[in-house]
Image: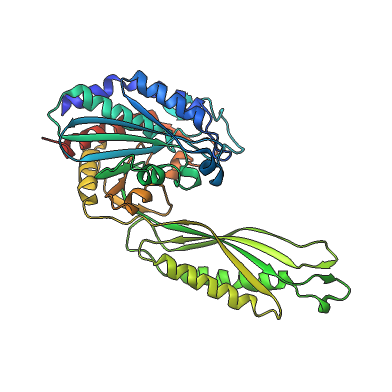
Amino acid sequence: MTHLVELVDAHAATQAEFLARLVRQPSDNPPGDCAPHARLAADLLEELGFKVERHSVPEPLVRMHGMVSCVNLIIRHGFGPGPTIALSAHGDVVPPGEGWTADPYGAEIREGWMYGRGAAVSKCDISTYAFALRALRESRLPLRGTVEIHVTHDEETGGAIGPAWLLAQGLTKPDYAIAPGFSYSVVTAHNGCLHLEVTLLGRSAHAARPETGIDALEAAAIVLSALYAERARLGTHVSRFPGIGAPGLTVGLIAGGINTNVVPDKVTLRLDRRLTPEEDPAAVEEGLRELITRAASMVAGARAEIRQVLFAQPLTPLPGAERLAAALARRASEVFGERIGTAGVPLYTDARHYAAAGIPTVLYGAGPRSLEEANAHRADERLPLADLNRATQVVALALADLLAG
């Protein structure tokens, strides 16, 4: 396989520039006007000699999911009869926010690190997967099977009009899938997420006569106390998957009240409940609804309205995923010169849509070693170009193993 590594190395400078051009094209989601990035990515992939399918998501569906435009891309390269492996990366990114020491869209390189929004999450893996497939194509190895690259543009809003839409439309039906992992480890499990909006309703009254009203904020305070007690209880329920830890519960937003001298009649909370792979999501939601309703009822006349805002299924290993994980971990250990194993991560990704369709799925892509080191979703997001090169070697070598004739 030395020749395959040499082919990856030969294109390292071109690959870095490919990534830089993607980083320089904004694709913040929100607002989610991602068609320009999709056009650029398609053009760059065609320059590498790939045939690119452009799949525009219908505008009403795009708007329904809070975006402006969304185009997903598929590349298919067949080496002969055999399994199909999808490599899925997303081109949309979170907005840059404040605190940058570099231009978020500049792709500046400092001491071997590229800085810019999307450099590590996940535009780097559009580059990783494209150049791994390019090396395989040029190697002329006797492989059997097909490699697809999926470039989607809605991961930051859940993946419903990216991977989930491609699968639902029958545009792809891979046997296996690999998605970005954002660390050196091969990720085989991640947690899920449930977002609930809780509205506490009471009745307004003049602050001079508070007893004539029903204080929604008082009810909210009792609900918050119950939720924080639940969070403390959850801390003892650690997942069996290393790296995931215990379930989490965060109240991230709160709004309400009319004026300082008015008993508040409405208070709204948004909560984030992280689900470990072992948990039953329906049971978790039912339990939260009961806890909130019971706590709110402790204020006479107050009531709670609860609405699900988001649900993301946890990723759990399916039969066949161990084959992907073993190939990637073995080759990563060789390339990095250290033992690279499997792990879980305490976040959720759109890779779950492949697993939900029964497709064995793991996460692996360019580093660095951890999300924290990458400044993922923070100011000064960055990626070592050496890791970009090494991850591309790993993916190319693992694919060669998996598709060996």
Colouring: rainbow
In x, y percent, where is residue 126?
38, 32
Residue 11: which quarter of the image?
A: top left
Q: Residue at x 24, y 37 (%)?
A: 337
Closest to the observer: 251 or 256?
256
Task: Choose between 155 and 356: the one closer to the eye.
Answer: 356
Residue furthest right as drawn: 208
Q: Is residue 106 left or right of residue 350?
A: right
Residue 283 drawn above or below residue 158: below
Corner quadrant of residue 275: bottom left
- Front one among 375 and 124: 124
* Residue 390 image point, x, y percent: 29, 32
Left or right of 107 in this view: 302:
right
Q: Considering depth in this image, is 50 or 123 the residue closer to the camera?
A: 50
Quarter of the figure with the N terminus: top left
Q: How many marks?
A: 0
Residue 117: horizontal and vertical position, in percent? 51, 34
Q: Is residue 174 visible?
A: yes
Q: Quadrant of the C terminus?
A: top left
Does the image show residue 111?
no
Residue at coordinates 28% horizontally, 31% vertically from top-left? 76
Check the image and report above or below for 360 versus 140.
below
Give the left or right position of residue 369, taking residue 234 as reference: left
Query: Is 372 situated left or right of 137 in this image?
Result: right
The x, y position of residue 51, in whole percent, is 32, 24
Q: Residue at x 40, y 22 (%)?
A: 44
The quadrant in which residue 402 appears is top left
